[in-house]
Image (tube, grey):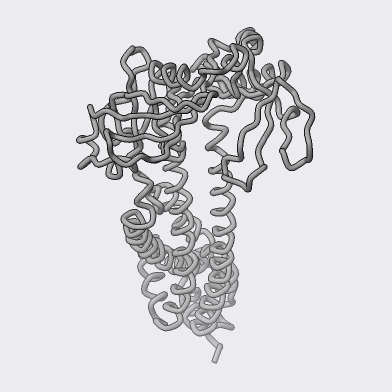
Amino acid sequence: MSILELLRSAVSNSLRSKTRTTLTVIAIFIGAFTLTLTSGIGTGINQYIDTTVSAIGADDVMTVTKNAETTETLTDGPREYDPDTTTTQASSGGPPGTGTVIKVITPDDLDTIAAVPGVVDVTPTISISGDYVAVGDGTRYEAQIGSFVAGVRLDLASGQEPDNGSSDLQVAIPVSFVEPLGFADNDDAIGQTLTIAVTDAEGTQSTVDASIVGVSNTTLAGTEAVTPNDALTTALHEQQSVGLSTEQTTSYSSATVHFDPASTDEQISALKTDLDDAGFTGTTVDDQIGSFKTVIDGIVLVLNGFAIIALLAAGFGIVNTLLMSVQERTREIGLMKAMGMSGGKVFGLFSLEAVFIGFLGSAIGVGVGMLAGTLVSNALSASVLSGLPGLTLVAFDPVSIGSIVLAVMGIAFLAGTIPALRAARQDPIESLRYE
């Protein structure tokens, strides 16, 4: 009997007892269906994170702050005054009185950072605290004022990025501000004038007008802030710094370091170590967003564990199905061996039956899982996840899908080993006498 004939016989024999085979296939289907969905969720979210990191660019940028040993919270009680520290309110909007105290970076610190091996250049991060943004006499809206670091790319919905080399005051606004500010669409906002208000240390509020050159999408990087170019940042900082001493205007909460974009992971780690030895902490964009991937991978791993348990349970179903099949076909097995069929081919015949059942259950489970995942993902993208353009919650990688089918077929083969060995070892004479 050739391999093709063995395969044809295995398929035919698997369908002899349709009810038993169907129940076993359903058990495998549940495991493969669950594994497909959980794998799809992990793939979709990780692809979104990778796309976000890629869209941000800045593979050669690192944010540097003073070391964590100088950090403490205001909930620890009264703190002795230190002119070299600054206080930041909890970004999560915690209760009044909460915040984090960090060491500020001074011009001398910038020189120290610049001297660290591997640092190409260092620039202070200028923080702007805006009061509101508005278009003309329209409604005023609170807005965060971000910073546009050289090398970083905005995920644009329309227009272009602010030009740091231009002396014109330019700004990009988040896509969520387009309609509230009175624009018909993203393109309508391009070229319009945005008014940004800041208040200086003396309590005087002043405004600065800038040209809108781009509209940015919302991403994990947090582009819900308006993004000014260097010229606008400088103009706002000058207005905000009125009444401050020179020392206060040259103190920064963080700095941006550029390093060689061709640096390896080992070289970047070495740079972080050198910065730490100098009293600073360096954090790349990948460090900040990579933690999301770790959490997502952990959740997906747990969900996959449940799916694998379901598949193992289905494996026992295959064992039971084939053992019953071997018992029912004892005389048939004896006849096949009496006619010259070797034990190896009998083993192969029953193993192929197990693999076929595994293939049937996994193929149906993967197919239905992909269909259900696509429908759910499209529905969520058009509703609760519409604020995250580009996110496909459930995405499918052909390699992962193929691996699931092969893994299930492998489990089915292992499950069919015991009944296949029992069939292969049967004595033909005893089998023919079996009632």
Left or right of 169: which side holds 123?
Answer: right
Q: Report which quarter residue 191 is drawn in.
A: top left
**Do we see residue 424 in this rendering?**
no
Question: The C terminus is located in which quarter?
Answer: bottom right
Q: Quadrant of residue 292?
A: top right
User: Nearest the camera: 323 or 117?
Assistant: 117
Where residue 120 sits: x, y (%)? 54, 10
What is the number of callouts on the image? 0
Q: In this view, does 306 lie above or below 130?
A: below
Is residue 165 visible in this depiction of the protein?
Answer: yes
| Residue 192 point in image, percent of width and height | 24, 29
Q: Residue furthest bottom?
A: 435
The location of residue 147, given as percent across then percent down, is: 45, 25
Q: Is 410 located above or below residue 216 in the figure?
A: below
Q: In front here: 410 or 78?
A: 78
Task: Out of 2 and 394, give the one closest to the viewer.
Answer: 394
- Quarter holding residue 16: bottom left
Q: Is residue 107 above or below residue 54?
A: above
Q: In this view, does 382 lie above or below 310?
A: above
Residue 245: percent from left, percent from top: 60, 14
Q: Residue at x 56, y 78 (%)?
A: 320
* Residue at point 35%, 37% (across, down): 174
Image quadrant containing the N terminus: bottom left
Of 37 and 252, nearer the camera is 252
